[in-house]
Amino acid sequence: MLRIGSYTLPNPVALAPMAGVTDLPFRRLCAEHGAGLVVSEMVNADPSLRQTRKTLLRSRHDGEAEPRSVQIVGNDPETMAEAARYNVAQGAQIIDINMGCPAKKVCRKAAGSALLADEELVARILSTVVDAVDVPVTLKIRTGTAPGQRNGVAIAQIAEQAGISALAVHGRTRACAFKGEVEYDTIADIVAATHFPVFANGDIDSPQKARQVREHTGAAGIMIGRGAQGRPWLCGQIAAYLENGRLLPEPSLDARFEVINRHLAELHEFYGDFMGVRIARKHMGWYLQHLPVAGDWRKQFNALGTPMEQRRLTDHIFNSLNNKEIAA
């Protein structure tokens, strides 16, 4: 079993932290469908932002499965340490440090994957945060800042020496963002050079791909990011396949729409009608990508402005697909 500090995970499949995606409603769905660990959206370490609506929503954990993992982002060791202490006081049981985000607005502030260029600063941030809290501290990184500047192995060794409990590696550099082939060989090198649990991450979108990546890299765990969008059950499918080779079937149409309807309702409740409707649009778009739909349902859904209208169109889509199944 995979352990992070004192916590033993039910399985080695984690949901990656994704800003704008892994909010509390989505994390709860993925955990209930079999994810062994779910990680929050990144929370800015800047104390002046703690009471903003965005940070308050990202810091909520009500009804969330344990261990509760909160990702923090920043570039100053003491500020990061204080953010870790604050989030532990708010209920975090694992602190995850973001050194993997390639977004320009994050890297412009010398945070996220931009930190990989400064190994000395990386070491200071990690050791300061580890010393600041009594809970496990984990780290998410990329393989380097650019194809010619891959230092993932060195960063991983720094992390292990600093007392980091587990590492997640997205197998691309900061410059590559989400383009090009994933460097599973680099992840394998990191696994071979360290002794703590490593999660392999990047372009894993099926149980079969997960097993292939795990066998190739020797990683202790698998982390799923974009592959779970519109498929909150994917982590559970992967966990079952890794455990015993059992390939769980795709959810039935009824089961999918039960998940979709619940997800939309929780988004409307969590964010309120105005923001909930807008955030529901992207999730519905991802769900529709995995359904045998024709026409412009996504365009119609995106034009709707109230929760009631979204629920009605969702029911209409379901009934249309259900009638097609019956006719077939």
Image: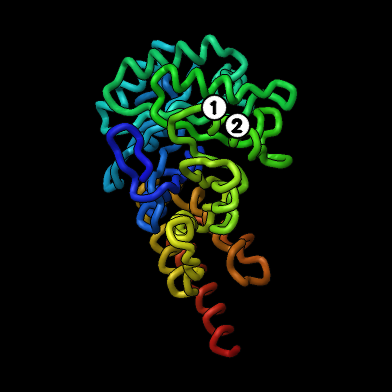
Q: Which mark is residue 193?
A: 1
Query: Is residue 312 in view from this perspective?
Result: no
Residue 229 in the image: state x and y as whole percent.
53, 52
Residue closer to the observer: 65 or 53: 65
Residue 248 in the image: state x and y as whole percent.
47, 67
Q: Secondary structure at mark 1?
A: helix
Q: Residue at x 55, y 34 (%)?
A: 169
How many residues crowd around disc 1 within 10 Å: few (fewer than 14), some, or many (20 or more)?
Answer: few
Give the image quarter of residue 34.
bottom left
Q: CA distance from mark 2 to mark 1?
A: 6 Å
Give the image quarter of residue 115.
top right
Residue closer to the observer: 20 or 68: 68
**Which residue, as the protein is rendered here, is positioned at the far front?**
192
Residue at the disc numbered 2? 189
Q: Specify the color scheme.
A: rainbow
Q: Residue at x 35, y 56 (%)?
A: 32
From the image, which quarter does the N terminus lie in?
Answer: top left
Residue 137 in the image: state x and y as whole percent.
37, 27
Q: Is residue 123 left or right of residue 67?
A: right
Establish if 121 lies above or below 166.
above
Is there a contact, CB below 8 Å, between mark 2 and mark 1?
A: yes
Establish if 296 lies above or below 111.
below
Residue closer to the observer: 215 or 59: 215
Q: Amino acid at mark 2?
A: Asp
Q: Residue at x 47, y 24 (%)?
A: 73
Residue 174 in the image: state x and y as whole percent.
65, 28
